[in-house]
Image (cartoon, rainbow, N blue to C red):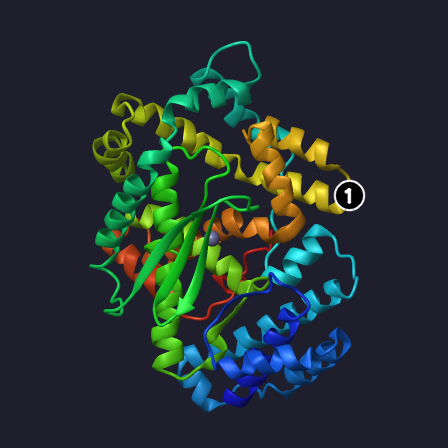
């Protein structure tokens, strides 16, 4: 399997020569990257090599059955390669529907939700934010007093990161030298990004193009840092790369099933780190004062945000319609404003995210729900927060496929 894994890494690097967004992280042998750049293998040859590699994966043996992780490794490599094969077809001009693409790349399909499904949530928001203007405008007006002033951003984020780290450490054995740096950037299609560097280090970038509201501090600190992407990558490096010598985990192809696990755990990690009302309490007592905002607004804002979160699947619908060609940018923007509570400028930024990352959008909300169901099923109903942490960390440190998160017999949608 180690030979297969090495060929896989080299193929991912080869695809990266045709797709600048494809290789999200690589900290394996640097000479492999140099070689990929020198060779610049044509797409057709990459496709043929991927087919050969999939065929060369040996069937499971007794040793795999005795070691759960070894079995997961085989399934995972095969599925990652199939996703690579699809991405190569797309780069070569193949047109897939939104659902075909997400199934092939992320091993999952987002449920289709009619507009009526969002009606109850929108009606509740109407009640919390009364007035005559369009709901999204009232939501935006309500949030004006919840923007973190630019000169306080760094200190608010630093405090949020410290809190998330403190909450994570008792449950996760992190390598002693793990660390990350935060940079503030502009003109990006995303709002935050973790660039994992290897050696237990991350570079986290925060996009300041649009106003940053107070709830983003915990979102970002958990999602990009603890116990999200930074911890996930560090645990893969520790347990799979260093302890087992599995070189395939030194590379992270963005358009692959690994992304559903990465984004899903990063989002679900927020409620693992802050069970119950611990988040709003911390925000109210610590972050609001630090940002110079009125703590009396904290619980009302948390209630509104919980409702807006429920509209995440409306964002999937906008992406599905836009990428399938049944809505243009203007229509998708209008849909996002009406059903997903995005201001026109934020909605427009979101359609640019669709342009670049396409069906990747499902990884955030569907990923979170799949991870949540899996962890809660594994830890049992009414499990303690500590028990939930254990299952969550086990998932972070193992190569599990999105389709394996579902309960046995559960339908795909
Ligand atoms: Zn993420």
Measured as percent of width and height from the top left, residue 151 is found at 33, 35
Measured as percent of width and height from the top left, residue 92 is found at 77, 66
Observer able to see residue 376:
no
Q: Nearer the viewer, residue 155 or 103?
A: 155
Give the vertical position of 385 relative to 234 (above or below).
Answer: above
Q: Residue furthest top?
A: 132
Residue 116, picture quadrant = top right
Residue 351, picture quadrant = top right
Residue drawn at 34 percent across, 42 percent down: 218
Residue position for label 1: 325
391 displayed left or right of 24: left
- Tally of numbered discs: 1
Q: Nearer the viewer, residue 374 or 266?
A: 266
398 displayed left or right of 315: left
Measured as percent of width and height from the top left, residue 213 is found at 40, 33
Give the vertical position of 367 relative to 122 (above or below).
Answer: below
């Amino acid at each position: 399997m180690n030979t297969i894994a090495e060929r896989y890494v080299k193929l991912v690097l080869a695809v990266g020569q045709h797709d600048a967004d494809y290789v999200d992280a690589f900290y394996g042998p640097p000479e492999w990257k140099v070689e990929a750049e020198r060779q610049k293998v044509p797409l057709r040859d990459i496709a043929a090599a991927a087919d050969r590699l999939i065929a060369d994966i040996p069937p499971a043996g007794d040793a795999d059955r005795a070691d759960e992780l070894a079995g997961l490794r085989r399934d995972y490599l095969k599925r990652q390669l199939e996703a690579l094969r699809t991405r190569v077809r797309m780069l070569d001009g193949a047109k897939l529907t939104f659902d075909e693409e997400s199934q092939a790349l992320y091993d999952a399909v987002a449920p289709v939700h009619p507009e009526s499904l969002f009606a109850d949530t929108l009606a509740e928001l109407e009640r919390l934010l009364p007035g005559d203007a369009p709901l999204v405008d009232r939501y935006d007006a309500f949030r004006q007093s919840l923007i973190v002033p630019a000169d306080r951003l760094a200190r608010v984020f630093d405090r949020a990161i410290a809190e998330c780290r403190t909450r994570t450490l008792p449950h996760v054995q992190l390598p002693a030298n793990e660390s990350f740096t935060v940079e503030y950037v502009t003109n990006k299609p995303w709002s935050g990004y973790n660039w994992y560097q290897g050696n237990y280090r991350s570079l986290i970038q925060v996009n300041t193009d649009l106003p940053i509201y107070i709830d983003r501090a915990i979102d970002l600190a958990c999602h990009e840092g603890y116990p999200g992407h930074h911890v996930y990558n560090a645990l893969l490096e520790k347990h799979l790369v260093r302890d087992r010598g599995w070189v395939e985990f030194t590379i992270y192809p963005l358009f692959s099933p690994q992304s559903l696990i990465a984004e899903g755990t990063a989002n679900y990690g927020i409620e693992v780190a802050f069970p119950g009302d611990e988040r709003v309490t911390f925000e109210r007592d610590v972050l609001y004062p630090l940002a110079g905002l009125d703590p009396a607004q904290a619980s009302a804002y948390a209630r509104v945000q919980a409702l807006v979160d429920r509209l995440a699947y409306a964002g999937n619908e906008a992406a599905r319609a836009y990428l399938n060609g049944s809505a243009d940018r203007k229509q998708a923007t209008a849909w996002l404003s009406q059903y997903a509570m995005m201001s026109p400028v934020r909605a427009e930024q979101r359609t640019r995210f669709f342009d670049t990352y396409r069906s990747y959008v499902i990884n955030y909300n569907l990923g979170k729900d799949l991870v949540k169901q899996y962890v809660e099923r594994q830890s049992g109903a009414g499990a303690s927060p500590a028990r939930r942490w254990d299952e969550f960390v086990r998932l972070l440190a193992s190569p599990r496929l999105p389709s394996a998160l579902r309960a046995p017999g559960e339908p795909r949608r």
